[in-house]
Amino acid sequence: MKCRKCGNSATIELRRHNAAFCVDDYLEFFRNQVREAIRKHRMFTRDERVLVAVSGGKDSLALWDVLIDDGYDTTGLYLDLGIFDYSVESKAKCEAFAARRGARLLVSRVADEVGGPVPVIKQVTRRPPCSGCGLSKRYLMNRVALDHGLPVVATGHNLDDEAATLFGSVMHWRTEALPRQSPALASTHPKLVRRVKPLYRLSERETAAYAFLRRIDYIVEECPFAAGATSIAHKEVLNRMEDASPGAKHNFLFGFLDKARAAFERLEDVSLQECARCGQVTTSTVCAFCKLADQVKRAAGDGPPAPDR
Ligand code: Q46
Ligand code: ZN
């Protein structure tokens, strides 16, 4: 197998691109995919400061690595979810990466902001852990960016993540979720920062290869709550389709973005207002995050429940 670019012997084969690359040309292919995503969706400019949400996993650290190497002004944000050893280890990976690259890392603890870590939120709300966790992450990313005057948050969502989310939305015809399925969400309110996903053109396997070849030390274990998430089942279905027909995931996601997404954009705007309690953007009087924090703090007042594993 020969590298498509230089003709030397190839290290990695990408079936969906019908191509193989040597190490250096693979790394350049990967960076070019990120550059193309940023350019095509005008995600951010070199004059803008970018908040990179990092989890300690391969995707977000690979993204941060590319952005640093390309000279972007980045700040990392680690949200400590308080999920047992997983959070302890993933935080250590982010801190080690930031120290190695001489980059600034902000840390925000969900327990401080909500009144309890994710396992306690799960118990208090009696809802799947990803529900309170996802809500808290979206809220805190936006608020930290605003507090530090950063106009945009970049996350490490890759092609597999995006295809699985789209698959889930279509399976249940959550049409209200479809317009929000985009590599770049514009700010629709002065208190909402832009959200972008510069890895949406790259598969999970491709980011893993990049992280490995760049010797990025990332946490391999998944969040212990991920096992029960339906997104895992959707990823498995899509992986089977990809095996049978390389490029299937790409065609599914990109076909939607190019041909179908616009049809689901809402005609009428939802009216956004500021939360009476925290001032963040919401569609009701008090935002979902403040309601969640109330619920958790109220339960903690009665004696915090012990998190179950
Ligand atoms: S961290 Fe949080 Fe994820 Fe764990 S609890 Fe679910 S949402 S799975 S990406
Ligand atoms: Zn609020």
Image: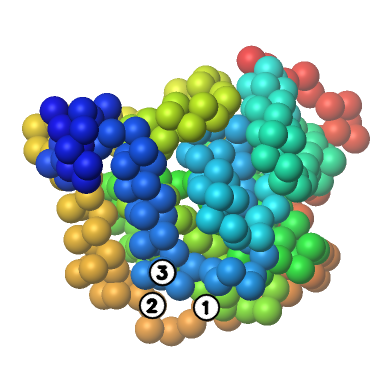
Residue 132: quadrant of the picture: top right
Q: Residue furthest top?
A: 309
Which residue bears the numbered disc 3?
39
Mark 3–mark 2 CB contact (< 8 Å): no
On residue 5, the disc is none
The mark total stands at: 3
Q: Which amino acid lies under the numbered mark 1 shown in the image of this protein?
A: Val
Q: CA distance from mark 3 to mark 1?
A: 29 Å
- Could you tell me residue 200's position as x and y percent? 38, 52
Q: Which type of secondary structure does the marked residue at label 3 adopt?
A: helix
Would you call the spot at circle 2 few (<14 residues within 10 Å), some (14-19), or many (20 or more)? few
Which is closer to the viewer, label 3 or label 2? 3
| Residue positioned 66% across, 60% down in the render | 73
Towards the viewer: 170 or 160: 160
Above or below, comparing residue 199 to residue 281 in the picture? above
Is the shortest distance between ligand 2 and the CB of mark 2 under 8 Å? no
Q: Earlier in the sequence, mark 3 or mark 1?
A: 3
The answer to whether residue 228 is above or below residue 273 is above
Label 2: state its secondary structure: loop
Q: Residue at x 75, y 57 (%)?
A: 144
* Residue 100 seen in the current view: yes
Residue 159 lies left or right of residue 7; in this view the side is right
Circles 3 and 1: CB atoms closer than 8 Å: no
The residue drawn where x is 41% and y is 55% is 34
Marks 2 & 1, CB-CB < 8 Å contact: yes
Q: Tell me the colour scheme of the image.
A: rainbow
Q: Is residue 159 visible?
A: no
**Circle 1 sits on which residue?**
270
